[in-house]
Amino acid sequence: MLHSQRNAQRGGLAHHLDGLTLEWVLDGMLGKKALQNRIVDKAAVETLLDYLYRHAGMDAGFLHFYLGKEKVSFNSVGDAFAGWLICIEYVHDPKKESYLLLLQPLCKVSRVLRKTCGRLLDYLRDRYPDTYAEKANLLETRLKRALGQLQPEDSGNVDVFDREAVRLDEEEMASHSPSTYIEAKALPAVLGHSRLQIRLQIVPEALNRPTFVHRDAIALGLRVLDRNDIRLSMKEAIGGTLLNQQVRLPLGGEWVELFFDLKGDRNEWVLVEVFQSDGAELVKSLVLPDCFAVSSQSQDPPPVVVAIAENQWQAEIDDPAIREVFMHLQTHGSLTESELIHMLGSPRNARRFTRDFDELVKKVPFSVRIETNSSGKRYVRQDG
C-alpha cells in the first residue's frame, strides 16, 4: 500500500509540474518554498529530473558529471540545471569553438529545447543577476576541479573549456585499450517482463596503467539490434539506478537485474544490445547471444501502411517547423501548448496544427495523444 501511495504521489507531482511554466519552476528551484515543499524525497527528485529532461533536455549524464560524488538533492539539481543552461548557450555560441567530448551531446539538443534554454537563461540573468553570477562561478569552479588545481598565475589565462577538452581527449585515447567491459546474461521472463543481469568489470592489468582513467559509474542503455521498429522500455533496475531509460552501474560492482519490455507489430524474438548511453564511448557494446520475446502492441490487423523506416517519415512532412515538432516528440516524449506556439511561430500556426493533427500524425511512426489541463493542451507520444 505504501508503494502504491508513493506512486500516486509521484504521478500527482508530475501532473502538477506539467501544469506550470518553466519560469515558475526555475523560480522554485532558486529559493521559492512552494516547489521545494513538494520535493520531499528521492522519488520526487527523480520526477523533477524527468520533467527537466523532457522540457529542457538535461540528462543523467550531465547531472552525474556536474555533481560528481555530491548527493542528488533538490538544491544540487537546481545548481546543475543552471549549469546546464549556461553550457547550452556556450556550445551553441558561433563565436566560440568547443571540442569537449563531454559537451558534444549538448550540440544535439533540438532547436526548440535550445530556444527554451536560452529563454530561461535570459530570465535568470534579468530576474536574478546575482544568482546568475553565482551559478556561473560555481560551474567554472566545478570544471576547474575536474581538471585539477590550477596555479594562481595560470588562472586568468586558461580557458577552462579548452583545458577540459585536452583532458577528455587524453582520457579517450586511454580508453582505446581495453580496461572496462560489460558482462551480461539473460534470465527467464517474470510476469511478462524480460530480464537480464548486467555488470561492469575492470581488467585487472588496467589498474596499473598510467593512462587508466577511473570512474565511479557509467550509464548504460539497452536497444534492439538492427530493429528500429521495436520499442524497448526499461521498467526496473534491482541493484542499480534507473533514470531516463539509462541505468548507472558502478565499475567492478555486483550484478544488477534489469526488467524490460519489447513491443512491436507482431510476436517475435530479437537480439538485444547493451551499450554506453552517455555518449562517451568508453565501453564496447555487447550483444547478448540469447533472444528476447517481443509482444505485439495490439491484436488488430496490421495497418495498410507498413512501419516507416527510421527517419524516412521526415520526408513525408513538407513543413520543416511541423517536422521538427514531431522530431521533438519522438526524442523527448511530450510538448506543451506554449512550446508548440513558440516552435511554430504563432498561435495561428498552432491552431492550424491542431486542426490538421489527425492527418499529420498518420505520417509518423508513433502515436500521439492530446491532453488538456488548466494550462492548456499537452501533446504526448504514446509508447504503445
Image (cartoon, rainbow, N blue to C red):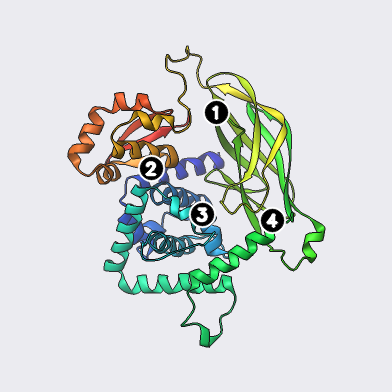
Residue 321 at x, y = what percent?
29, 40
Specify few, some or many for label 1: CA neighbours under 10 Å numbering under 14, 14-19, or 20 or more: many
The numbered mark, 2 or 1, whose residue comes first in the sequence reads 2
The numbered mark, 2 or 3, whose residue comes first in the sequence reads 2
Res. 215 visible in picture? no
The numbered mark, 1 or 3, whose residue comes first in the sequence reads 3
Residue 172 at x, y = what percent?
63, 59
Whole-angstrom CA distance, mark 3 to mark 4, is: 40 Å
Q: Nearer the viewer, mark 4 or mark 2?
A: 4
Q: Dividing the picture into quarters, in which one does residue 250 lie?
A: bottom right
Whole-angstrom CA distance, mark 1 to mark 3, is: 34 Å
Secondary structure of the residue carrying numbered label 2: helix
Q: Nearer the viewer, mark 4 or mark 1?
A: 4
Q: Residue at x 36, y 26 (%)?
A: 363
Q: Is 16 positioned to the left or the right of 63 in the image?
A: left
Secondary structure of the residue carrying numbered label 3: loop
